[in-house]
Image (cartoon, rainbow, N blue to C red):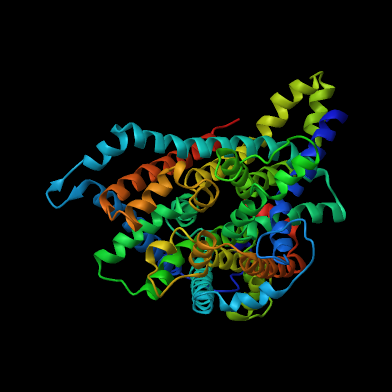
Amino acid sequence: MTEAALPAPVTAPAADREQLVAIGFVLPSFVIIAGVFALPLVLLLGVSIVDANGLTFTHYKRLLGMPYYLGVIWNSLRLGLLTTLIAFLISYPAAFALARARGPLRSVLLATLFLPLAASVIVKAFAWTILLRSDGIVNETLIALGIIEDPIRMIFTETALIVGAVNIFLPFMILPIYAIVAQLDPRYAEAAATLGASPVGTFFRVILPLTLPGIIAGVALVFSLSVSAYVVPTLLIGEKYPTLATTIAKAYLLAREPGFGAAAGVVLLGIAIAVVTLSARLSREPK
Amino acid sequence: MNRAAIVVCWIMAIGLALFLVIPLLVIAAASFSPTPVFDLPLTGASTRWYGRIGRLDGFWPSLLLSLQIALLSTAISLVSGTLAAIAIARGKLPGAGIFATALVSPLMMPGLVLGIALLQGFRAVGFTAPWATLLVAHLVITLPYVARTMIAGLARFDFTLIEAARTLGCTYPGSVLRVMVPALAPSFLIAGIFSFLASFDNYPVSIFLADVRTKTLPIRMLQYIEEAPDPTLAALSTLILLGTVILLFVSDRVVGLHRMAGTSD
């Protein structure tokens, strides 16, 4: 409309030329995503079902048929589920406080989110190995407070694993929720209250649905990160909590069983794709 | 919200802030430990561990390798990712929405699976030089960060401003340089910082492409931690954290953390 109103100050390039330029612009990224991401993943699927004798499903039979490997898959899911649940329960209320904070307090709180987010995962996991040692600070503090008498074994337990995982993946939960909560118009809650809704009713029928996109984004991100975490279980619990991620690493780096490792990789990939697809569908649904 | 709910929210927020910062403070404190064990709370202070970082086995080549890979992959991704984001934002590209999703999708995929897929893929085509495979692999790690930030940044940019500048007598390159570049500079900086950090810290992809002589710093660090953790590692970790703090401080001055929180969804 504006183009028609103005006396065409610049000659607009032909539509097909613009499209050609656009294709030229995306070409380098397309080559990277197709050649170094999509194609290798398809090849991985091939490696998991083809061996020297042709088509085979032995790797999947071993993975999905043996109780040990079903336990491994469950360990991964359990790590993902517990981490996501705890991170959500902490992050959701905290996001509301963060959204109300102003001035220097807000800067400090945001800095405490961004610094750990940007900090190296290996550094943070290493910090937890120091914190949770039997002569570490957590034990000494608990003894000093009289909560326990003797140091308790914390490192290389599931508790250590979950505490570390929650700590490391927490910023990925609170930031998307905060981004939504900060834009929440307080007048919605006021309107609901004026119209006679109880605080609990306002929360479940107004605030929760409005913040759902942030929750879905945070939950999907934290679950896909924690279900496939490798550094965290390696340093905080070790051999006795085998996950799909540690099984993949072992198959490739120690046992030299690429076919089996690839099958475990495809299962983990399947979980990740399921989470992404589900979250995309949920956030598209009209509320 | 009623008063009790607000109090609960504040307790959670402050608890969360402390919980997130404690491991970082512990690392920094442990790096000044006077004894080879992590004697906390500190009974004295010593800076000798910082002097020992350079003597860690294979430290300098690994640091150099990680810096090279992170800087180069970030530079390449910034160029190709920004070009792609411009094409997507202009809306002249068929299937732009699907392509935008594809560009960001490696962020949600397990790093370890990408690592073994790349190992298989590179082997299949006979591409096995560790340095080059690491660089190419890190393009997939950095590109999604650039694409996500630049697509979000460009969604707020009004392309008719360029036309307006040209109407007012600016040349096309001049109007891009004087209108578009300043408007997108903050997004560009954030994209650069986060993709650099993602590459510099990557373990799950690099581990499958490294060999005995070509090990990135995270691979080296995990190896030190598993073999013999001592305060030297805490000192190295503290220096890495310090670098991260400086990068974040710069981006806060230029962009503001508040805006970063809004864009990094």
Left or right relative to B193: residue B94: left
- Residue sitting at the far left: A53
Q: Where in the figure is residue B173, as x and y percent of width and height?
A: 58, 80
Residue located 42% across and 54% down the image: B112
Residue located 81% across and 27% down the image: A191
State whether residue B169 appears in this view: yes
Q: In this view, does A194 lie above or below A274?
A: above
Q: Where in the figure is residue B165, as x and y percent of width and height?
A: 67, 74
Q: Residue A283 or A96: which is nearer the viewer?
A: A96
Q: In this view, does B239 lie above or below A207?
A: below
Q: Where in the figure is residue B122, as x and y percent of width and height?
A: 30, 66
Residue located 47% across and 36% down the image: A77
Residue located 59% across and 54% down the image: A125
Q: Residue B89 or A224: which is nearer the viewer?
A: A224
Q: Where in the figure is residue B71, as x and y percent of width and height?
A: 54, 75
Left or right relative to B89: residue A245: left
